[in-house]
Amino acid sequence: MRSKVGRTVTETDNVWFTLLTGNGNQIHFNEDYTRRTFPGEPFLGRRVVNGFLTVAIAAGLLVDTTSRNGFQVGLEDVRFSRPVFHGDTLYSEARVTEVRESRSRPGFGLVRIRTRGLNERGEPVVEFDRVFMVRKRGETWHGARAE
């Protein structure tokens, strides 16, 4: 499955997210520091988008497809393959890698989905597993019936 739309990451997105999460790493919001400290590859002196924001956007682009009927119980094996910069547009693709019954919650199952975030050039920027708990078909939960 692939995201139908992309999301361009702005400087405002990055600064707000970085400050909201208390991440004081200068590489996210100090151009002078980044230029002096990381002048070569892979950053070329540019400020880098917060990695957790990259994960959040990549996951969010597929919420309607992957998790509308369940809730996330795990985020695992996160790997960043290249930096994301202000102005980059992210897209996502995902595939189901595991489906099994829940051992702790009767009537529920677990679905593992491997998600990849890609930039506008189709280059992978992040990859991670999300694990969701979903009701099994035909089961009811708080009065709602799973279809």
Image: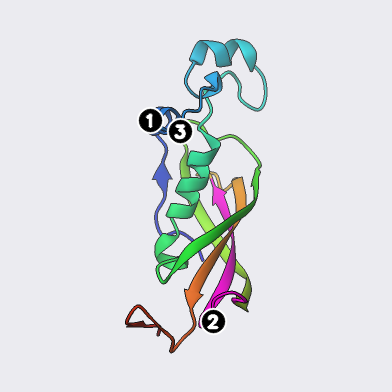
**Label 3 is placed on what type of residue?**
Thr
**Disc number lying in front (2 or 1):** 2
Under mark 1, the amino acid is Trp
Query: As drawn, is 57 to the left or to the right of 26?
Result: left
Secondary structure beneath disc 1? helix
**Residue 114 on the magenta span:** yes
- Compute the Cα span from label 2 to label 1: 41 Å
Amino acid type, label 2: Pro
**Is 121 displayed left or right of 40 in the figure?**
left
Q: Residue at x 45, y 59 (%)?
A: 62
Residue 32, image x and y in percent?
52, 10
- Place of residue 133 in the rendered image (x, y in percent of width and height, measured from the top left): 51, 70
- Residue 95, above or below 18: below
Q: Nearer the viewer, mark 3 or mark 1?
A: 3
Left or right: residue 143 compared with residue 85 = left
Q: Which residues are magenta?
A: 102-118
Label at residue 21: 3
Q: Quick one: quadrant of the C terminus?
A: bottom left
In this view, the mark in front (3 or 2): 2
- The residue that label 2 is drawn on is 106
Q: Residue furthest left?
A: 143
- Relative to residue 136, is residue 60 depicted above or below? above
Residue 115 image-quadrant placement: bottom right
Q: Depth check: give the residue in front, 38 or 135.
A: 135
Give the image quarter of residue 121: top right
For the stretch drawn in magenta, what is the main secondary structure?
strand
Relative to 43, residue 131 above or below? below
- In space, the residues marked 3 and 1 are separated at their CA atoms by 9 Å
Res. 16 mark: 1
Distance CA(mark 3)–CA(mark 2): 36 Å
Q: Does label 2 or label 1 sit earlier along the sequence?
A: 1
- Closer to the camera in the image, 98 or 140: 140
